[in-house]
Image (spheres, rainbow, N blue to C red):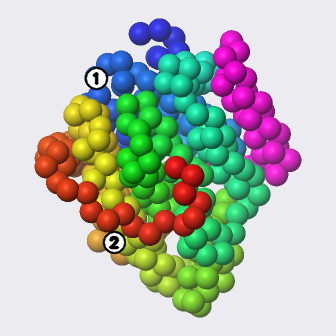
Amino acid sequence: MDAVVAHSEAAISKGSSSFSAASRLFGRELREDVWQLYAWCRHCDDEIDGQDGGGASRPLSAADRQARLDRLRRLTHAALAGEPMADPAFAAFARVARKHRMAEQWPLELLDGFAQDVEAPRLASQAETLAYCWGVAGTVGVMMATIMGAGGHAVLQRAQDLGLAFQLSNICRDVFEDAHNGRIYLPADQLEAEGVAATPAVLLDRANREAVFRVVVRQLALAETYYDSARVGLRALPFRAALAVAAARNIYREIGRRILRQGPSALSARMRVPKPVMAVLAVRGAGAAILSRFEQPDAAPPRPQLWSRL
């Protein structure tokens, strides 16, 4: 294992215990490609958020975030152009992009998604929340499917659906943490319908916790439709890739299910899935991967016009 791959493995181990565990089910070559793409995505996210491996954020001014975003865009264009990259995260991305002839659209739209984090976002509606999810996670689903050898309009849409589901789960897991950082990703119109103003201080007020939780429940119900849609796409992946993706799908889905079981108090701290439970969910994922080979595709969930380009 060379230094770039080793750096990428360390990035996924630190940044996502769920995806790191699931990635062990890939074959070695694909596993390393997945690690390298993840390392670049994680690096870009951390740069905008002032994080290290997805940990606690440190305060950054809007000007500092913008400067970081400009740098990420400049280096990403350079990596896509095949220029030598000193930063290991960009060296990893350059390798994967070149090897799999990745279209520029997806990584650049990922950075467009992160651009919404430069200033404290306020997403007015469900459509705007989903558009944000597309930018920061649906694009990742498409890129991951591409390096796994999947292609075609219908398959890539199922891959983006898994990214949407993952991000909706993340939003619900991190409601209070995001509010502490001045960010709100729940749809403002749904909060206001519950009598909650879409401001960080109001979200953090304990008196509003049950009302906020009702919006979280709706987001997790929507996530379920995308998790179901993504299951159909498993049949288009090589079998070991399907095993890994099914395991990741089950583990991330469990985050939302645990939030629902615990109720409003789940919003106080980041929900985590214990490692023994991850192992069980990975085994169940294997069953889903096998069954997907024999299932007929069902109707996809409604999607905003944004994804007609896929």
Q: Name the residue under label 1.
A: 27
How far apart are labels 1 and 2 at the CA level? 34 Å
Task: Specify few, some or many for label 1: CA neighbours under 10 Å numbering under 14, 14-19, or 20 or more.
Answer: few
In this rendering, the answer to whether 250 lies above or below 124 is: above
Element on which disc 1 rests? loop
- Vertical order, 249 against 239 (above or below): below
Residue appearing at x 57%, y 64% in the figure = 305
Q: Give the range drawn in magenta.
A: 57-84
For this view, does 307 lie left or right of residue 24? right
Residue at image location 33% in from the left, 59% down from the top: 229
- The magenta stretch spans residue 65: yes
* Residue 21 magenta-highlighted: no
Tag shown at residue 218: none
Number of the label disc, if any, that sits on residue 260:
2
Magenta part, dominant SS: helix
Amino acid type assigned to the residue bearing label 2 in the image: Leu
* Amino acid of disc 1: Gly
Position of residue 121 measured from the top left corner of the image (x, y, whole percent): 70, 63
Query: Relative to residue 47, is residue 7 drawn left or right?
Result: left
Q: In which quarter of the image is the N terminus?
A: top left
Marks 1 & 2, CB-CB < 8 Å contact: no
Q: Nearer the viewer, residue 139 or 22?
A: 139
Could you tell me which secondary element the residue under label 2 belongs to? helix
Front residue of this view, candidates 89 and 213: 89
